[in-house]
Amino acid sequence: MAPVRNKMIKKMIIAAICTAAVNCTMLDSMAGGLTKPSFSFQKLDIKNITLSEITFNLLTSVKNPYPVSLPKSDLNMNLMIEGTTFLKDVKTNMGKVEAGSVKDLPFEFKLSYDQLQQLYKKFPSKELLDVKLDGIMGLPIPEKFQLGGKKSVDFPFAESRQVPAILPTVDIKNFQIMKPDTSKVMESAGSNQNLGQTAVGMLDKLLDGKSGTSPTSMSSALSGLDMNIDTQFDIALKNLAAAPLNFSDLKYDLTLKGEKFVSGVPDQIINQGKESTVKVKSSFPLKTLSAGLIDAIQKKNADFRLVGASGLKVPGLPDGILNFQYDKNGNFKW
């Protein structure tokens, strides 16, 4: 039995030595050895752009090199753009970080154009802006590895990325409603030639901006014609900051005086540096013209709402196509 007992004692001594060695290694690492947890600023993307704010996606990660998990780790960070602080003392609980693992920590934050406008004025010609993320990552020390009562270790970090300088605007320009050929109006009236003649006269007055017939009477008379009227206009997109923009795959929905007018996709998008022109050619059914829309067309003046979405590519950033959503209210004359 003595040899067996000796073997057991020897195994226990070896296990104790190994455990002590691990503890010493851990304590040494926690206390300032070469192997430490690390924080990484992996990616900064623009998730979405509107006419009032930019939404950023921030991807960070924490690496835990230790053979034990780190529970309830804390992160405190600041975000600066070109030296101006936009987010300060952002605190978050990273949760448990498993042993020997890398944990992704995504964040989302929004900056309004009111916040960014003053910054752009300081750097009117700078296309890409420097974004710095710095702070402190606080990691708890597991109880069995604590030394001298020290329960946590703080690791400072500072990393930088770049984002484009963007402050887009949207306007409607060169709006026209095309007068149809008399022959097409008469054809759409069919056998009711009196209706055709009346409609030709009404359309002449309507599209030339002449009064004389009430919008209600016009709407009633024109509702009998089964034909479309062509319209065309430009959607003017401009970046008031420095970055050149390339728009693509734009969809639009235009309402006049609160009523749906036309929607669809444009025929052509012309990108010229900081300005883009979206060429729209569309049509609307004549029989759907309400008295309100007819009144607006007569006066060549209307409140409008232009809603849509577009792909947006910023030259110099390898982030693919960004999502630009616009919702513009205003008034325009033509």
Image (cartoon, rainbow, N blue to C red):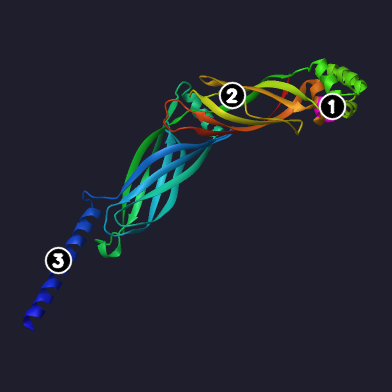
88 w.r.t. 130: above or below = below
Dot 1 corresponds to which residue? 225
Q: CA distance from mark 1 to mark 3?
A: 96 Å
Quarter of the view holding residue 149: bottom left
**Amino acid type indicated by mark 1:** Leu
Residue at (45, 37) in percent of width and height:
45
Q: Which mark is residue 15?
A: none
195 w.r.t. 32: above or below = above
Dot 3 corresponds to which residue? 17
Tell how many labels. Answer: 3
Sooner in the amino-acid sequence: mark 1 or mark 2 = 1
Dot 2 corresponds to which residue? 237
Q: Secondary structure at mark 3?
A: helix
- 302 with respect to 38 (left or right): right
For this orientation, the residue located farthest to the left is 3
On the image, the x and y values in percent for residue 204 come to 84, 16
Q: Secondary structure at mark 1?
A: loop
Query: Is most of the magenta stretch helix, strand or loop?
Result: helix
The residues colored magenta run: 289-295
**Amino acid type indicated by mark 2:** Leu
